[in-house]
Image: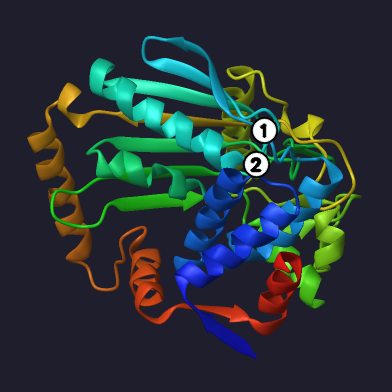
Amino acid sequence: MRYRVSIDELTQLAARALKKAGASQSMALATAKALVAADRDGLATHGVSRVALYAQHLREGRANGKAKAKIIRKKGGTCLVDAAGGLAYEAAAIAVKEAIKRTRRYGVAFCGVTNSHHFGAAAYHLAPVAEAGLVGLAFTNSPPAINAWGGKKPFFGTNPIAAIFPRKAAAPLVVDLSLTAVTRGKIMLAAKEGKSIPSGWAVDKDGNPTTDAKAALTGSLTAIGGVKGTALALMVEVLCVALTGAAFSFENDSYFEPGNAPRIGHAVLAIDPDALAGAESYFSRLEVMISEMLAADGVRLPGARRQLMAVQARAQGIEVPAALYNELRTLAA
């Protein structure tokens, strides 16, 4: 059984649940908006299904519900935001706002976030960048999920990468992917529902291929492209951790088991097309590529499906499994 719930109702329900668990009003609302946006876009693994876990972390002190994110360093086109152990979304919003402001002045900006928590759907944070007419990239590390090439122990995180490319008269191109064959969220949902997973998604803690979702959560996820995927994961670690002072993936405990307070790092890069060949050239050249792509039957632009899902959700609401809806109501009561 599933319920269809309006975006506003689901946002308020999630916010109440997070606030009851100890989040400040602003943190709860910022987090709820981000999670509901993921459900709106058809990304249920990063949606309100995460509220219970966030609430648990708030209650256990693994996330600081009263944290106040702030800028602690800045120089030219760069800045560093300290999330102070809180949920990620307010700190990420500060980093994005600063990236936009500094890009307008310098043509490019790189803003990092340290001492943070789960980043959610990475492309969500980039929407304001595209609205400002800028190109944006976002990165985050996460608790260990991918073994270093040749190893068996989880070492790198799923380490998502996202990019957004504004268009002049259409929705932006959106690229959003983790560096694993599948998101940990899909495996988490399979484990919760007692379902098996396809071969090739993960290995168990001993490095053996597994179709057991629970065994996969204590093992390693398979990197996209094998050694190439692990190299990209290393790159994200350096950008998000070595540059920000956050904790490396292997220094963070799993979100899904008892452990330490995560100190995740994020990074946002923004580029002004006008600072290079010029905005008009950028928009023109981008459309040449898109037109050529769409000339072939069956081609779909990155981000097109989530944009269609968002239109439908705004008009019809979001479908939520009854068990999840009832869980949210209990957490919010």
Quadrant into which the N terminus falls: bottom right
| C-alpha gap between disc 2 and disc 1 | 8 Å
Foreground residue among 17 and 110: 17
Asked whether the residues under the numbered discs 2 and 1 touch, taking CB atoms below 8 Å apart as contact, a structural biologist would say yes
In the depicted structure, whether residue 228 falls above or below residue 49: above
The residue at the point 76 percent across, 35 percent down is 262
Q: Which residue is mark 2?
A: 87
CA neighbours of label 1 inside 10 A, class few (<14), some (14 to 19), many (20+): some
Q: Residue at x 37, y 9 (%)?
A: 76
What amino acid is found at the position of numbered circle 1 in the picture?
A: Ala
Q: Determine which residue is flagged by label 1.
A: 67
Can residue 317 be seen in this snapshot?
A: yes
- Callout 2 amino acid: Leu
Q: Choose mark 2 or mark 1, whichever is in front.
A: 1
Nearest the eye: 213 or 227? 213
Is disc 2 placed on a helix, strand or loop? Answer: loop
Q: Position of residue 63 (x, y in %)?
A: 75, 40
Going by the image, does 100 lie left or right of 175?
left
Secondary structure category for the residue under label 1 = loop
Mark 2 residue crowding within 10 angstroms, few (<14) / some (14–19) / many (20+): many
Q: x and y percent of residue 179 in the render?
A: 59, 46
In this rendering, the answer to whether 316 lies above or below 24 is: below
Q: Is residue 81 left or right of residue 135?
A: right
**Numbered badge on residue 169:** none
Identify the residue at image location x=56%, y=44%: 26
